[in-house]
C-alpha cells in the first residue's frame, strides 16, 4: 500500500474515532457525495506534515462549504467563542 493510502486510512480512523454519533460508513458516504474523498487523499503532501488537528479543521471547513454542515467533534479543534 502506498504512503498516501496508509495515511488516508490513519487520518480517516482518527476522524471516525472522534465521531461518536456517526458510523465510519456514513462519514465516507458523505465525503463521497460531496467529492471530498479523493481530495482528502490527494492532500496527503500537506496533511501528513501538519498537526492532525489542522487536517480536521480543513476537512470540516470543506464540508461546511459544500454541505452547510460540519463534523466539529474533533478533539481539541473546536474553537472557543
Image (cartoon, grey):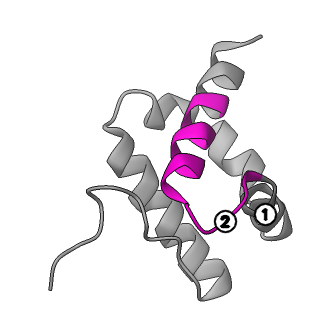
Q: How far, Cα to Cα, is label 2 from label 1?
A: 6 Å
Q: Are marks 2 and 1 in contact (CB under 8 Å)?
A: yes
- The chief SS type of the magenta part is helix
Q: Which residues are magenta?
A: 9-24
Occupied quadrant, residue 26: bottom right
Q: Can residue 43 be seen from the camera position used here?
A: no
> Which residue sits at x=60%, y=69%?
21
Residue 16 shown in magenta: yes
Please provide percent x and percent y for residue 81: 14, 86
How many numbered callouts?
2
Q: Please name the residue that numbered disc 2 is placed on.
A: 22
Work out whether residue 77 or residue 36 is closer to the camera in this orientation and state it. 77
Neighbours of disc 1 within 10 Å: few (<14), some (14-19), many (20+) = few
Mark 1, residue position: 26
Q: Which residue is painted at 43% across and 66% down in the image?
A: 73
* Residue 66 horizontal/vertical position (percent): 66, 79
Q: Which mark is residue 56?
A: none
Q: In percent of the image, x 57 and y 80: which residue is there?
A: 65
Residue 50 is drawn in which quadrant? Answer: top left
Given residues 27 and 45, the one toward you in this image is: 27
Amino acid at each position: 500500500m502506498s504512503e498516501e493510502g496508509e495515511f488516508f486510512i490513519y487520518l480517516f480512523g482518527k476522524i471516525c474515532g472522534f465521531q461518536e454519533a456517526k458510523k465510519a460508513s456514513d462519514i465516507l458516504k458523505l465525503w463521497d457525495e460531496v467529492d471530498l474523498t479523493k481530495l482528502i487523499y490527494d492532500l496527503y503532501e500537506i496533511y501528513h506534515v501538519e498537526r492532525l488537528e489542522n487536517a480536521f479543521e480543513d476537512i470540516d471547513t470543506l464540508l461546511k462549504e459544500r454541505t452547510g454542515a460540519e463534523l466539529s467533534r474533533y478533539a481539541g479543534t473546536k474553537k472557543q467563542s
